[in-house]
Image (tube, rainbow, N blue to C red):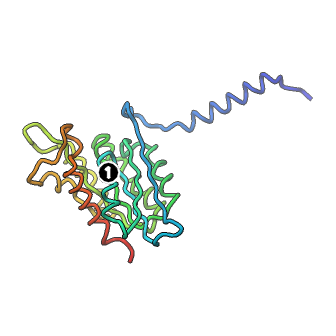
Amino acid sequence: MKHIPFAATILLTCTAITHSWSQDLYDYKKPRESQNWTTISLKTKPANGPDLPLVLLIGDSITVRYAAEVGTELKGKAYDSLLGSSKAASDPALLDEIKLVLRQNVYSVIHFNFGLHGDVADVRTGLPDVIATIKRYAPNAKLIWATTTPCQQKDDVPDERVIEKNKAAAEHIQKADIAVDDLYALVAKHPAKLWDAGGVHYTAEGTAIQSKQVAQAITPLLPQ
């Protein structure tokens, strides 16, 4: 019997592992943002607590900011969890993040949005896969799509970039027959300017206004 030297065995093993690992890399052509982040906060029904339905909020940093206040608004009605991500809708790694969260709980309502990150093409090509993934791993959940909120523009002109993203998303959302929470209109048509100094995120007042509307969109869909 011919024996393979120990060093050669290690080399072959490492080569196989490297080859396998390289095949697992995401085939994502666009560069991700330099500061790429994911925030996950999961709540389940406590052993001795009330048997309330579970709600999941999915979105970007806008969602992350209003998530806690939505939980306060839904107190006594539901337990809310959060998946926040900076990934664009077409990033395949985002689908794995969604799967990771949906496989751990059974959610009654999922309120989701992907709009600030990426471009219009990301929404057009990626949103169908996002919807399909959510429906596959949460087949009984009621879904709500939140329109992307505008960024403050010079001279207060409309945010055409976000408007185009919302139009691209609307085609897929309507086709999938998903309810819409129009956060864009809430912010764009509000008599007061709700942005903070950065022009992307919102003041405490702006966040509170959004959280109330999100909770109001979720509440009617909760099981009795």
Residue 187 pos. (x, y %): 17, 52
Q: Is residue 216 above or below residue 171?
A: below
- Residue wearing tag 1: 63
Q: Residue furthest right?
A: 1
Q: Residue furthest bottom?
A: 224
Residue 78 pos. (x, y %): 39, 67
| Quarter of the figure that contains the C terminus | bottom left
Q: Nearer the viewer, residue 186 or 121?
A: 186
Q: Identify the residue shown where x is 31% and y is 49%.
A: 65
Q: Amino acid at mark 1?
A: Thr
Q: In the image, is 158 to the left or to the right of 89? A: left
Q: Is residue 215 above or below residue 100?
A: below
Q: In the image, is 35 to the left or to the right of 164? A: right
Q: Identify the residue shown where x is 41% and y is 42%.
A: 91
Q: In the image, is 45 to the left or to the right of 200? A: right
Classify mark 1: helix, strand or loop.
helix
| Quarter of the figure that contains the N terminus | top right
Residue 126 pos. (x, y %): 37, 48
* Count of marks overlaid on the render: 1
Q: In the image, is 44 to the left or to the right of 185? A: right
Q: Identify the residue shown where x is 33% and y is 65%.
A: 74
Residue 127 pos. (x, y %): 35, 51
Determine the image quadrant of residue 92: top left
Task: Please rate how many residues cluster around mark 1, counting C-alpha atoms within 10 Å: few if below 14, some from 14 to 19, many from 20.
Answer: many
Q: Identify the residue shown where x is 33% and y is 61%.
A: 72
Q: Nearer the viewer, residue 165 or 77?
A: 77
Determine the image quadrant of residue 212: bottom left
